[in-house]
Image (spheres, rainbow, N blue to C red):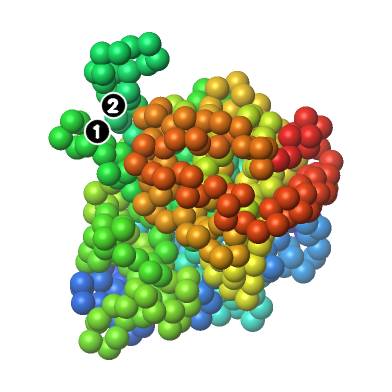
């Protein structure tokens, strides 16, 4: 790697061959990785390992990439520090495959110090093993050195190298690879999404004019969910939607966190083996599939309140409200064997904006505006000090590299060309009085939209297209005008703020700016 931070050499010539390096324990078993961190483990009542890290969320303010930020000598020196560690520090090295879809499949290599084997253990459970021959020249490499003297995450996207310094949070390792997955999806004509995906197979009601009352055959509907961490993305993606299994209906979770929307309508998945889910408030009744997987012995818990005797308290924020668990797809009943969605029909933007209806249907331009606005509430997964505050993150995706305006244009073009129906879904509450829109309401909405039974109407108060009828739900009780005081002035102020926000993106198409709702 040169002083400018660029390299024309493949990673295999910059980094040592881990199979031959005396300082590296290459591709140890999961049992060995757990053994390396045995002194840090509390064994849960389920037999799974639980660990407490010093860092309990991502360090977004300490993250820089060479595409969007000026990289000076100090930044390149941080990358050099990580590369040098692969030659002389006592490390473990694990290879895994990210993605299965042709050009959107990558060999990933993670280095961590041996004493932090727990990070590699959790990360290795997310992705799939690779053949030895495939490991010779990895596509992406991350070196995570928690004991570095400064917290710094530095990314060289073109080289596929990430240095994670000063943090022992597993999420930094995970996102280092998913960030590059999304970046390369955009370079190849698609669009990386911070999104979950699912396939819903269900019976749809007969079309207009058919008075037989009979149902059509089973039909597959592809859904994708864009949302910030802790807004319900995992819950809704994994939920079975209370379908009629006896009639052959089913909802299958394909991906939980990061996907790539391709020009042919395919949604390529990234994590083939596991999921990294939030555990705070995990409820066995509302989230049975997730609860079963998190309480399986194969899970790895991080920053969850576990007593010395192994008792687990998912309601406790003793360490953080960003407690996590790595779970395996094999133990999540709603997860399918495949990770790619063959065709996407519906995209949902998850928000927690209290003046938004439970759901609204959007045109392609409005959907692109929603993509650019990325409105939600800050959670502990991002910046714990600002949890609960309103936030806007383009694409609800804090990991975008490159022009954000171009991402909005690309999203509009893709959903318009593919004929995808787009919606904004409020999973929070309405108004200051806090009328909750719970899991039951959101699931009912998703199921009935998939069935095609929702009746839509223009709402004079908000200017949005909202449901006038949803089977199984009293939608009138969630009327925005009835639940939000001073709605008119609040919406006027909100639209002004939204337009000002969209105007900050020079590359964004004017028709998307004009579609602000």
x, y (%) of residue 424? 56, 42
> Around disc 2, counting alpha carbons within 10 Å, would you say few (fewer than 14), some (14 to 19), or many (20 or more)?
many
Q: Position of residue 373 (x, y in %)?
A: 69, 47
Quarter placement of the N terminus: bottom right
Residue 207 quadrant? top left
Task: Quadrant for the C terminus, please.
Answer: top right
Residue 396 seen in render: no
Q: Nearer the viewer, residue 163 or 442?
A: 442
Q: Position of residue 326 (x, y in %)?
A: 36, 62
Q: Residue at x 31, y 58 (%)?
A: 286
Quadrant in which residue 298 is drawn: bottom left
Res 445 seen here: yes
Image height check: is 284 above or below 347? below
Residue at the farthest left position: 246
Nearer to us in this view, 12 or 316? 316
Q: Is residue 20 left or right of residue 168?
A: left
State the mark number for residue 86: none
Cα distance between the residues tagged 2 and 1: 7 Å
Asked which secondary structure carries label 1, the reply is: loop
Task: Determine which residue is flagged by label 2.
Answer: 203
Q: Are marks 2 and 1 in contact (CB under 8 Å)?
A: yes
Q: Quadrant of residue 515?
A: top right
Front one among 441 and 162:
441
Residue located beneath label 1 in the image: 249
Horizontal and vertical percent for residue 155? 65, 57
Q: Nearer the viewer, mark 2 or mark 1?
A: 2
Q: Quick one: label 2 or label 1, which is nearer the N terminus?
A: 2
> Residue drawn at (48%, 70%), measured in percent from left and top?
322
């Amino acid at each position: 790697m040169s002083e400018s931070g660029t390299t024309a050499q493949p990673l295999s010539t910059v980094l040592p061959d881990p199979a031959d390096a005396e300082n590296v324990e290459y591709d140890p078993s999961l049992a060995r990785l757990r053994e390396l961190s045995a002194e840090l483990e509390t064994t849960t009542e389920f037999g799974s390992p639980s660990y407490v890290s010093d860092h309990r969320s991502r360090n977004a303010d300490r993250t820089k990439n060479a595409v969007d930020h000026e990289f000076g000598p100090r930044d390149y020196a941080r990358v050099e520090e990580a590369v040098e560690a692969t030659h002389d520090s006592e490390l473990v090295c694990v290879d895994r495959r990210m993605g299965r879809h042709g050009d959107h499949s990558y060999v990933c290599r993670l280095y961590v110090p041996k004493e932090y084997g727990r990070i590699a253990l959790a990360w290795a459970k997310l992705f799939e093993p690779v053949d030895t021959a495939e490991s010779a020249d990895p596509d992406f490499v991350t070196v995570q050195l928690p004991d570095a003297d400064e917290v710094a995450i530095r990314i060289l996207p073109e080289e596929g190298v990430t240095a994670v310094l000063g943090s022992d949070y597993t999420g930094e390792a995970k996102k280092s690879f998913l960030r590059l997955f999304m970046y390369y999806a955009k370079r190849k004509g698609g669009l990386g999404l911070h999104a979950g995906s699912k396939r819903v197979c269900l019976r749809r009601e007969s079309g207009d004019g058919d008075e037989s009352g009979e149902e059509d055959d089973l039909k597959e509907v592809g859904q994708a969910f864009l949302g910030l961490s802790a807004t319900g993305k995992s819950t809704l993606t994994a939920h079975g939607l209370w379908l009629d299994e006896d009639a052959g209906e089913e909802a299958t979770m394909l991906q939980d966190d990061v996907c790539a929307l391709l020009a042919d309508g395919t949604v390529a998945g990234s994590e083939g083996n596991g999921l990294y889910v939030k555990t705070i408030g995990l409820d066995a009744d509302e989230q049975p599939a997730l609860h079963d997987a998190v309480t399986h012995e194969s899970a790895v818990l991080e920053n969850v309140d576990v007593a010395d005797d192994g008792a687990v308290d998912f309601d406790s924020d003793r360490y953080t409200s960003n407690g996590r668990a790595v779970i395996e797809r094999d133990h999540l009943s709603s997860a399918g064997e495949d990770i790619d969605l063959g065709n996407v029909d519906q995209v949902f933007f998850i928000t927690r904006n209290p003046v938004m209806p439970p759901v609204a249907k959007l045109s392609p331009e409005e959907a692109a505006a929603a993509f650019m606005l990325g409105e939600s509430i800050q959670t502990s997964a991002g910046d714990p000090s600002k949890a609960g505050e309103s936030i806007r993150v383009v694409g609800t995706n804090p990991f975008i590299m490159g022009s954000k305006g171009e991402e909005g244009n690309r999203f509009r073009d893709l959903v318009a060309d593919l004929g995808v129906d787009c919606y904004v879904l409020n999973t929070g509450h309405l108004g200051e009085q806090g009328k909750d829109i719970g899991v039951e309401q959101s699931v009912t909405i998703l199921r009935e939209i998939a069935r095609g039974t929702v009746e839509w109407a223009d709402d004079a108060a908000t200017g949005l297209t909202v449901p006038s009828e949803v089977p199984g739900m009293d939608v009138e009780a969630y009327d925005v005008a009835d639940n939000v005081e001073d709605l008119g002035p609040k919406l006027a102020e909100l639209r002004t703020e939204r337009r000002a926000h969209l105007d900050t993106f020079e590359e964004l198409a004017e028709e998307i700016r004009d579609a602000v709702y």
